[in-house]
Image (cartoon, helix red, strand yellow):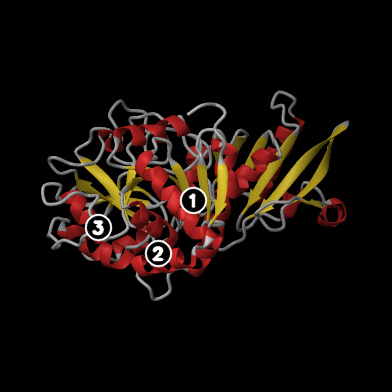
Amino acid sequence: MTPQTTTRIASVVRLNQEGPGKQSLPEWWASEQKQKTPEAAAIMEAAQLLQTSDIPVAFPTETVYGLGADATRSDAVSGIYKAKQRPSDNPLIVHVDSLDMLDRLLNPEATSPHAHEAKTARNTIPLIYEALIAKFWPGPLTILLPNPSGSCLAPQVTSNLTTFGVRMPSSPLARLLIHVADRPLAAPSANASTKPSPTAAEHVFHDLQGRIELILDGGPCGVGVESTVVDGLSDPPSILRPGGVPIEAIRACSGWENVQLGYHDGTFDVKEIPRAPGMKYRHYSPKARVVLFEAGSDVQGIINHIKHDLEDTAVGAHSMGLVRTRTWKRGLQLLPEAEIEKTAKPVTSLINNFVEFTVPVRNSSKEVFDCPLGTDIDDIARGLFAALRAMDEREVDVIYVEGVSDDELLAAAVMNRLRKAAGSTFKV
């Protein structure tokens, strides 16, 4: 790959919106091919690149956009690390289109993972995962499995661990691509390493332009945070990364009632290889400094803190962003609401009601970008990374974020991402 690589975006939004209906993946694909749709041409091109090229392909899933490569070819997987500029001691999640494909991965001596023919299923998935697979697959759940002797997975996928993470995405478009490529895909988020995860094709283009050839544009992602990663090989089982499947839902499954939290929200600064993505390094960080206020913080204390920052020349903030969730009012009372209403200008963004206004500070004024994510946790999760990226586009100096309580649904995943992105975390 040269610096002159042209990155193209191919729209497959229709496929992502329509899905296969009652058709199987092969039937859906045959119908698209028969009609010679532009979406079919894009999928075929992407599949051929995945089969033959060492440059990865970006594609949408229900969680975030993934950067996919053939998980069985070392050079292809190395292309992911090169494009993302990501440390190679961070394992990758393998994506499959079916339990048949997973069975072939777990039984390399029985059949090639590149074969289409259905084989007799083997009882090789540990029983602890049976309830989770039945309830959450396809979906945003990654399980940790033993990497078998003679594994066809490239060692770069597992970072030479004895286990690998695998999931079956609920996005029919993602499964269709895997089906057509006929390869298990190693696919981390399609962003530059440490940056906020991409939830739209334009986010991928911003980070990886010139490093990859093709982005499949399926529109905005529905979940907005990565998959939950669980380890059922440990006793008791553990959650290695919170994500799109809430912890409470996992605890409701047989055998997982006493699941432990095997992660913490800082960085994992030990020398050993992490067991799952997102455990070791700082992640999800925009260029601006992120200040996170934990749920339950006193609003007046927050206002005082921000006003002090605005007036402190040592802080050097010429512009700032507010990412609001549950309780903060628009503008966080830095100006009277009537004044904000009169002077605020709408900002073009994927986030609704994103506005800009100015706040007088001593003998000058400073720009404030106000971004509400809504009060529903699904909306907050869906909009989080887009909000951080939107602030970066406005080149703000500091972003103040209203946290949410950890004890509900997707909130643990949201706060995990925010704590990893934040340079400072406060409860006032």
Q: What residue did someone put label 2 on? A: 29
Q: Is residue 169 left or right of residue 288?
A: left
- Quadrant of the image containing the C terminus: top right
Eye-nearest disc, 1 or 2 = 2
Say what amino acid the circle numbered 2 marks: Trp
Mark 3 → mark 1, Cα distance in angstroms: 38 Å
Tag 3, which secondary structure? loop
Residue 304 is situated, as x and y percent measured from the top left of the image, at: 70, 41
Please tell me which of labels 3 and 2 falls first in the chain.
2
Mark 3 → mark 2, Cα distance in angstroms: 14 Å
Give the quarter of the image for residue 124. Answer: bottom left
Tell which of 324 and 49 is nearer to you: 49
Whether pointer 3 and pointer 2 mark residues with C-beta atoms closer than 8 Å, the reply is no
Q: What residue did someone put label 1 on? A: 414
Q: Is residue 380 left or right of residue 254?
A: right
Residue at 85 percent across and 32 percent down: it is: 362
Q: Residue furthest top?
A: 314
Eye-nearest disc, 3 or 1 = 3
Please tell me which of labels 3 and 1 falls first in the chain.
3
Q: What residue did someone put label 3 on? A: 116
Give the quarter of the image for residue 253. Answer: bottom left
Mark 1 → mark 2, Cα distance in angstroms: 35 Å
